[in-house]
Image: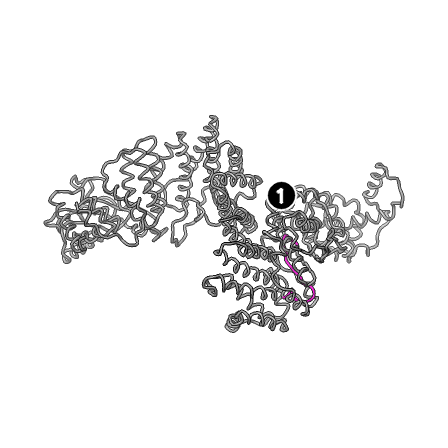
């Protein structure tokens, strides 16, 4: 192999021979290829040959591209693209070169577009002094910058590995002279071989076989940054092939490939706009399914280019192509094709309807370009670049049509066994956040997953669930993501794929923690420990540490700070034994979380529960964690907080009551779907395990039911859990404000099988009873939602491999005894503590079932129409100062006039009832109707009247509260509580049924103005 100087000398020799051979065209082509790689990537050849003078002295010139402003440095093309007008000129003349350059500059600048810079190539060396003189003359005479590239510069560049093939092709340099390839170049062998073959190819057949070879390499250069520098060459060869391409099958496909390469590889579709038009003109008038599918993809590309302002194609053209493609699909379906073809057409129609657009914007809306962009905007939505799909910001262009087409496809899949469903299923997964609200979503999701699993195996379902989970997480929809993660778990819970299930369980644990449901999170974390510890695979041992670290974090979140510390001792032992570089907090985020949790627990103990400091210190001293805690606390400027401030901080964070695990009773707090929960038990090992079993199941169940909208009242639910081997029905205790329950659970034993019906019933029966009581749905509708939750996999979510008690039975009896002996938190703190729900589990504010604005307005209007029943009373009350003050105060509290009228009417009718109804009367339908009409009769002047003290604020509020019972019935809802919780009813009706905001035109019967 020659040295670099020897190779350069050989190249200069080859350049000299160009003049001898009068090889104008070869030097022009060589110069253009070098210039594209070294000067400006957006150069194209001029239209006339050098010798004919048809190019006005220009052998090449740049075309406009906005890529340098839009995405500077994003690719090899973008780094070399110039927004100046550059003209390429060259000469093989060896004598009087300076005069030749001056004449060409004058010719270039005298005609055509304004030129900013001339790149002049010559085979003759140009001395430095002559170069500077020429540059000065060009600037002064024509205000143009001049760069001269002579044989010395060319030889140096052509000796580089990426340009040597040009020296081989145009200068006949032997291939054995090739320099060693760049060590950083990592192209696959097939690509290197294809590139070498195409560099030597002179003639093209334009047939499908040749096209297939070029397409593979062109796509590699388009979508792989390390090969992007070759893209200009591949596009050059593609356009040469286009000149001889077979018209029916190859030419439209070349149009497509060149267009995509320009957009995805070079970041600018504009140079290929004519090819895009030519493609659609041909593809949309045929029945080639491959071309029709390419058309749908290209529509997405074109829209992305239009939105990014890197094409001149218009929205009118795009709309026309969309309409033509839709019409072509319908026409082909009307022809009654075979089942696989029908499936393909329905899938294609679904893709067309699944195109994503900004929500709430006109069809021609496109966002302003970003001021700074470091990478190309997404041209086609993939799992990597689609980004978060917030349904408030994005929409699919036609959701009903998309879901209709997908359902028809699903109907065909049992017959269309060979239909390649994966791409359609992937598009469905990527757009899942925008589709999930549609009623057909569950069925389509299940059918597509089943079809993919049939062709690709069980792991395909896990892969698809992971894609959807990521999309939901990006859209900040953790509940939907959680469902997909559970599907991942089930799809990988066996054999060689167990690591996937453990990862899914860890992710589920983090999601439950994120949703402020720490006991559900702890169950998943402990299941990881147990499964990894039971496995015979030693590579799974690190999961034991991860699971224990997560479990300790969950106890911290639940307020069980001493239990968290006790678990941390086991977790740190496992971390040191099974994990590489175990104490690296940057690498191991769960360990870092443990250090932070332990530090905060120590700080809280020092400030509000100093008698617990020694217990925490003893645990952490055994593991060495005390030193890390000390470092954190000493190095931070930490404020002094009172007990109430610590509790408020815990409430805002969605955590449990601090030090909830000390004292003779243990308490768990959480909030979800409008309800707040307080679950208590004796602080003994078996009681705590049973109570946590119940709490974990409650949190999992409510997370499953919340998206189904069980219409729960915003009540505080207080559950006392007690151990009883003969556990019976849950018992509700009378209370108008708190939903108070006693629940008996059987203590766990090793003989209990977590998958037996009895175990499920022990958990599900009391939970369903409690939630049904707080739901306003009729019982049948509520139970249908529970049934739906079980259909969606509630069974395997409630049980993580083993019974909760089996998973969590880690700490000895002594631990519970020590904690029970500590004094509990003050009773006023425990009774008033209410933790915050995560926003995804907040009480819904959307219209509730049975609500319609027009119907609600009509109902209010009927309330006003009842004024004659109390007209005399209302006139008298409105004349008194006390009632007028009461009415003003109630208005300030949010009451509408119809609330006041309803309350007064109820008080008057109840008075009539007590005065006019005998203790015994006929119960015939006619008599009942007659007496009801009598109670509702218009008030007369001589009717007995109530005194003013019957209409105090408390009386009016009580009367309105009682009226909500009939409101609930009118809405088609049911009250299941033995003692109504009127404040909760008022809050729910206001939040979901416009109870406090809706009104109707009415007579001013209060005269308060």
Q: Is residue 558 above or below residue 54?
A: below
Residue 624: give x, y in percent of width and height. Answer: 52, 70
Residue 663 colored in magenta in the image = yes
> Which residue, given by chain and number where applicable, does mark 1 sit on?
788
Q: Is 520 left or right of 582, judged from the image as shown?
A: right
Which span is picked out in magenta?
Answer: 659-675
Residue 671 falls in image quadrant: bottom right
The location of residue 433, given as percent across then percent down, is: 52, 46
Of the pair 934 and 1006, the residue shown nearer to us: 934
Residue 925: quarter of image: top right
User: Badge 1: how crowded within 10 Å, few (<14), some, or many (20+)?
Assistant: some
**Between residues 370 and 179, which one lies in front from this camera angle?**
179
Is any part of residue 730 visible from this angle? yes
Tag 1 secondary structure: helix
Residue positioned most to the top = 335
Colour setting:
one colour
Q: Nearer the viewer, residue 906 or 923?
A: 923
Q: Position of residue 2 (x, y in %)?
A: 17, 53
Q: Position of residue 392 (x, y in %)?
A: 53, 48
Question: Residue farthest to the left?
Answer: 95
Q: Is residue 186 left or right of residue 604?
A: left
């Amino acid at each position: 192999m020659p040295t670099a100087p020897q190779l350069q000398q050989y190249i200069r020799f080859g350049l000299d021979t160009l003049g001898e051979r009068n090889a104008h065209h070869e030097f022009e082509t060589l110069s253009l290829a070098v210039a594209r790689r070294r000067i400006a990537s957006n150069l194209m050849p001029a239209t006339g040959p050098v010798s004919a003078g048809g190019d006005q002295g220009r052998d090449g010139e740049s075309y406009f591209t906005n890529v340098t402003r839009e995405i500077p440095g994003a690719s090899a093309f973008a780094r070399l693209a110039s927004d100046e007008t550059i003209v390429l000129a060259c000469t093989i003349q060896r004598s009087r070169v300076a005069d030749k350059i001056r004449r060409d500059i004058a010719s270039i600048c005298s005609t055509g577009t304004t030129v900013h810079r001339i790149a002049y190539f010559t085979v003759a060396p140009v001395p430095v002094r002559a170069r500077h003189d020429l540059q000065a003359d060009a600037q002064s005479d024509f205000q143009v910058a001049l760069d001269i590239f002579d044989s010395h510069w060319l030889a140096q560049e052509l000796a580089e590995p990426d340009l040597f093939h040009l020296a081989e092709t145009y200068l006949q340099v032997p291939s054995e002279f090739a320099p060693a390839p760049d060590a950083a170049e990592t192209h696959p062998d097939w690509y290197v071989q294809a590139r070498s073959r195409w560099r030597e190819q002179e003639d093209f057949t334009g047939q499908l076989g040749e096209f297939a070879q070029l397409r593979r390499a062109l796509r590699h250069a388009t979508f792989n940054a390390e090969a992007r520098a070759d893209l200009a060459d591949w596009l050059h060869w593609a356009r040469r092939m286009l000149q001889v391409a077979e018209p029916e099958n190859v030419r439209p496909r070349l149009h497509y490939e060149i267009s995509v390469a320009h957009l995805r590889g070079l970041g600018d579709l504009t140079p290929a706009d004519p090819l895009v038009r030519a493609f659609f003109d041909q593809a949309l008038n045929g029945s080639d399914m491959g071309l029709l599918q390419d058309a749908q993809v290209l529509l997405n590309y074109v829209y992305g280019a239009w939105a990014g302002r890197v094409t001149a194609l218009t929205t009118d053209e795009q709309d026309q192509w969309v309409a033509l493609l839709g019409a072509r699909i319908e026409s082909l379906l009307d022809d009654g094709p075979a089942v696989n073809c029908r499936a393909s057409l329905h899938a294609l129609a679904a893709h067309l309807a699944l195109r994503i657009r900004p929500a709430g914007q006109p069809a021609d809306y496109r966002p302003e370009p970003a001021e700074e962009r470091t990478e190309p905007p997404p041209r086609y939505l993939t799992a990597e670049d689609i980004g978060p799909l917030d349904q408030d910001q994005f929409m699919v262009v036609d959701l009903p049509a998309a879901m209709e087409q997908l359902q028809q496809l699903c109907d065909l899949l049992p017959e269309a066994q060979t239909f390649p469903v994966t791409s359609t299923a992937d598009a469905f997964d990527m757009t899942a956040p925008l589709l999930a609200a549609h009623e057909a979503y569950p069925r389509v999701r299940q059918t597509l997953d089943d079809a993919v699993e049939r062709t690709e195996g069980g792991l395909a379902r896990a892969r698809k669930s992971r894609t959807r989970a990521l999309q939901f997480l990006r859209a900040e929809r953790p509940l939907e993501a959680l469902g997909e993660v559970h599907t991942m778990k089930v799809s990988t819970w066996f054999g060689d794929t167990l690591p996937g299930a453990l990862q899914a369980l860890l992710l589920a644990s983090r999601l439950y923690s994120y949703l402020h449901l720490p006991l559900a999170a702890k169950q998943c974390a402990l299941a990881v420990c147990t499964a990894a510890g039971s496995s015979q695979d030693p590579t799974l041992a690190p999961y034991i540490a991860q699971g224990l670290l997560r479990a300790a974090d969950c106890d911290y979140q639940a307020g069980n700070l001493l239990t968290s510390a006790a678990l941390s001792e086991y977790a740190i032992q496992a971390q040191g034994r099974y994990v590489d570089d175990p104490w690296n907090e940057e690498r191991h985020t769960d360990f870092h979380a443990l250090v932070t949790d332990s530090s905060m627990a120590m700080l809280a103990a020092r400030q509000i529960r100093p008698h617990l400091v020694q217990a925490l210190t003893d645990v952490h001293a055994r593991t060495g964690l005390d030193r890390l805690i000390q470092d954190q606390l000493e190095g931070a400027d930490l404020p002094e907080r009172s007990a109430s401030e610590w509790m408020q901080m815990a409430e805002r964070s969605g955590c449990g009551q601090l030090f909830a695990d000390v004292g003779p009773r243990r308490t768990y707090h959480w909030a979800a779907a409008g309800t707040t929960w307080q679950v208590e038990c004796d602080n003994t090992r078996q009681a705590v395990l049973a109570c946590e079993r119940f709490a974990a199941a409650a949190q999992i169940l409510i997370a499953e039911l919340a998206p189904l909208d069980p219409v729960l009242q915003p009540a505080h639910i207080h559950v006392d859990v007690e151990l009883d081997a003969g556990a019976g029905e849950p018992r509700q205790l009378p209370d108008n404000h708190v939903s108070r329950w006693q629940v008996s659970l059987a203590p766990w034993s090793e003989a209990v099988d977590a998958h037996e019906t009895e175990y499920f019933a022990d958990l599900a029966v009391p939970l369903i009873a409690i939630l049904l009581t707080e739901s306003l749905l009729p019982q049948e509708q509520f139970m249908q939602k529970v049934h739906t939750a079980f259909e969606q996999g509630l069974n395997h979510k409630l049980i993580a491999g083993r019974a909760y008690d089996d998973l969590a039975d880690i700490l000895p009896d002594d631990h519970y005894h020590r904690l029970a002996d500590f004094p509990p938190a003050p009773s006023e703190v425990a009774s008033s503590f209410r933790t915050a729900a995560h926003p995804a589990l907040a009480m819904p504010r959307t219209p509730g079932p049975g609500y319609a604005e027009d119907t609600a307005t009509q109902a209010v209007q009927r309330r006003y129409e009842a004024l004659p029943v109390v007209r005399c009373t209302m006139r008298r009350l409105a004349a008194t100062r006390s009632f007028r003050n009461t009415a003003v105060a109630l208005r300030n509290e949010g009451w509408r006039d119809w609330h006041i009228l309803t309350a007064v009417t109820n008080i008057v009718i109840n008075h009539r009832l007590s005065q006019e109804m005998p203790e015994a009367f006929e119960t015939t339908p006619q008599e009942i109707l007659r007496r009801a009409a009598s109670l509702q009769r218009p008030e007369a002047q001589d009717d007995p009247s109530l005194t003013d003290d019957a209409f105090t604020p408390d009386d009016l509020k009580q009367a309105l509260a009682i009226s909500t019972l009939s409101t609930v019935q009118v809405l088609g809802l049911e009250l299941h509580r033995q003692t109504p919780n009127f404040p909760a009813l008022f809050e729910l009706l206001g939040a979901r049924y416009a109870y406090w905001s809706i009104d109707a035109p009415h007579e001013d019967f209060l005269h308060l103005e």
